[in-house]
Image (cartoon, helix red, strand yellow):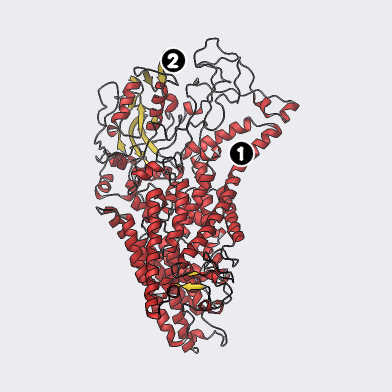
Amino acid sequence: MSPSASGSNAHLLSLDPDSPISSQSSAPNGESANATTSHRTDDSGFSIDPLGETLDDPITFKRKQKEPARFSLQNLFSAESSAQPPSIHHRSQSHPLDHRSTQFSNGFSAHGDSRTDTNQSSGWDGGKHGGPMDWYVEGPGRRVGYDNLTAIDWIFEYTKERQRLRHLYAHSRGILGYIRQLLDASHVWLVLIATGIAVGVVAACIDIASNWLGDIKTGYCRSGDEGGKFYLTRSFCCWGYDDLSQCQHWVPWRKAFNISKGGGYVVEYLFFTLYSILFATSASFLVKTYAVYARHSGIPEIKTVLGGFVIKKFMGGWTLGIKSLGLCLSSASGLWLGKEGPLVHVACCCANVIMKPLKSLNHNEARKREILSAASAAGISVAFGSPIGGVLFSLEQLSYYFPDKTMWQSFVCAMVASVTLHALNPFRTGKIVLYQVTYSRGWHRFEIIPFVLLGIFGGFYGGLFIKLNMKVARWRKSRGFSFPVLEVVIVALITAIINFPNIFMRAQLSELVYYLFAECADITDDEFGLCKTGARSWATISLLLVAALLGFFLTSITFGLEIPAGIILPSLAIGALYGRALGIAFNMWQTAHPNFFLFANCEPDIPCVTPGTYAIIGAAAALGGATRMTVSIVVILFELTGALTYVIPIMIAVMLSKWCGDTFGKRGIYESWIQLNEYPFLDRNDDRPPPDIPVSHVMTSVNDLSLITAVGHTIESLTNLLATTSYRGFPVVAEAYNPILLGYISRNELSYALKSATSRSSRNLTPETAAYFSHQPFADPLETLDLRPWMDQTPITLNIHTNFQIMLEMFQRLGLRYVLFVNKGVLEGFLTKKDLWYILEGANGARHAQVFSGPGPGVLGEGNAEEERGLLAVDDDDDHDHVRAFSPIDARRPSL
């Protein structure tokens, strides 16, 4: 079952994120206040445009009559004439709100037409045809957007989209109407194509800039008559030279200063270290100062966002710019990190920025996440030159909801990005990835044994890496001090000191992976000594294994620094290092003992063992062990190498790496970071058995909730309720002693309704004005405030005896934000998505013990900060151990 909507729906009202009543979330740890102020104008990743018009339009609870069928030749060509409803006369009584047609955020009039009939007088009991569409009044209520770090309502979003399309088709007839429908349907494809082009261009710029910055650490290109220019990389500067050591245009730093051989090594060591520190520090400073969400890979946050969570400013324009620039610097610094994973974040940022002008996409959080799922495939497509692998990566690793149409959209976006990068040809080799190679030889059956060993090694690498990296990350999170930029400087210094003496660690990771993957026959300049034969190969094997071991520890402490950093390329490099070492060892064995029975099928004049293939399989195993991906890794490496014959060995290695890695824990590196950051991501692929208990054992009891009764309130009393509590929502009941559930109203909607009612530009009601949440037949609509339009009168409810497994399935499959528990209509308890996550994860011992302790206050009744209790709390530091029911009668319902 997919997150779909039911019932009738449609107008969504947006809240200006800069308005006084919009919720402001605290900045992440380490983000300076100055940075927050300087970039307050940055568009948030999932913000909703402000509501510009008043909401004081007439409200009707009567259903809209169907328009009588009419036919004329004019209908074939005129959409406006057929959409204009016939004039209906209403009661002659009028009031100050007559002749208003409120324009809703989805871009069409509440009266169902772009024009208002001046002969029509509408009142609070206006006519059925001309009155406003009331799906939100009798159903989920009006909405003003989502707070930061809260869950979206999938059902509401998809129902809103269906109602928008219903209205579009009803008012788009004839040829012009067909064109309007076609333009509306083209929005998705325009965004996807534009995103693919933008991602391809950005990826090409990052490749060119990072390669030049990486080469400048060792020397520079001297300008000359033969075409040498300072801005050229080493490969372009020495274009046409088979042996790069013979290139006269490339000047190492020792030659630039005319220093002898012994002192030249020291000079090159010094320049290498200083440039590494400079690049890494610059990247960290940019992230810390301008866009804190540009740090890390971004994939754990993308998974959480696609699962229905709101993280504002995570995909804004500043994040896109700083992430792209930071990737150039951090990749060139020599740190053990990669740019492949962060390119997924860059692709999602491009899609989010491009879709902002299109209200049909930007104003619907569910459709937005479908576009982001498709855009994420473009990031992997340009990272590995693998469009199909990108689609599978999005399906297997990222997407929470992936319908068939999203797969087709992902394919189009990934294809456009790959074609764009191929057209730009940043390496001038016809390849869109630096380490793209091809193989001409096959494999032999005896090689299954080393392939199995590589798979096992990859699983152990992944499990140990996740354990070590999580220990380092928890230490960073729990320590009493935080100097992120200084920490980057120290790690960059240590990395540069370790990298330079080892020739394999000194090179850029993308260049290293290419040489490890390549066959010796394709290498014209064996600068790493990978094609040595005889006893000299033992020194190469030793350097490879030492580089793999040191790279493992450096990657463990680097992933998590305050810089843009991915884990995919370092894992590929580490796996390729020990894979190549094993391949060289097997090649030496076969060469020394050609008559051994395992090598009986080897032809005498053709190399029997290809060490480069061992590097490919080792890289696949290491990446599978770290991320626990399977199918997507096989397809990515197949597209990267074009070696169809090696699909089976890669599959075997990836399968074994996942099995061995699962012995350390079921979570991959991205899922481990989601748990570390406590993002409320409910993984539908989690096969851990949930507790076999009724929901009454884990829910928040009604005695620990802040309830609102249906009547007896004023605007002032409700305003005081918002000022004295920090809950993000309130169940509405008939009365305190008999809490029959009437609905649920969130803090945002209640606050906005009160502000709007007392605004001078609106109704200008006094604080003493009565407010109510149920039908009051004798209330004067001009002198009272009816809050039913803002209340969700159809919330999802379950019986308190429902099994925990059923509730979990509903949260996962329907994308729910919260569930109310009732018994014969009487409210008994409440549970949010974050509460459910805490229960499943067992955030701490006390919480885990209380889950199984029987009926009671549940996980929300522990007296912790309300933000830790669930999505109903606003980000603050106030503790509320017990909040009583808010009622005009100072009395509470007895304990259940």
Q: Nearer the viewer, residue 167 or 500?
A: 500
Q: Nearer the viewer, residue 872 or 741?
A: 872
Tell me, yes or no, if residue 683 can be seen here: no
Question: In the displayed structure, would residue 133 be above or below residue 46?
Answer: above
- Looking at numbered disc 1 in the image, what kind of residue is underneath it? Asp
What is the x, y in percent for residue 40? Answer: 41, 40
Q: Give SS at disc 1.
A: helix
What is the x, y in percent for residue 891? Answer: 25, 24
Outermost residue, top side: 92
Earlier residue among tags 1 and 2? 1
Question: In the displayed structure, would residue 128 be above or below residue 212?
Answer: above
Crowd rating for badge 2 (residues with CA inside 10 Å; few <14, some 14–19, many 20+): few
Q: Nearer the viewer, residue 511 or 875?
A: 511
Question: In the displayed structure, would residue 256 be above or below residue 624?
Answer: below
* Callout count: 2
What is the x, y in percent for residue 642? Answer: 58, 68
- Looking at numbered disc 2 in the image, what kind of residue is underneath it? Leu
Kindly identify the residue that appears in the image at 55 percent across and 21 percent down. Answer: 131
What is the x, y in percent for residue 789? Answer: 45, 25
- Identify the residue under disc 2: 782
- Identify the residue under disc 1: 184
Kindly identify the residue that appears in the image at 52 percent across and 12 percent down. Answer: 94
Q: Quadrant of residue 826?
A: top left
Crowd rating for badge 1 (residues with CA inside 10 Å; few <14, some 14–19, many 20+): some
Q: Give SS at disc 2.
A: loop
Q: Nearer the viewer, residue 460 or 277?
A: 277
Numbered tag placed on residue 263 in the rendering: none
- Quadrant including the C terminus: top left
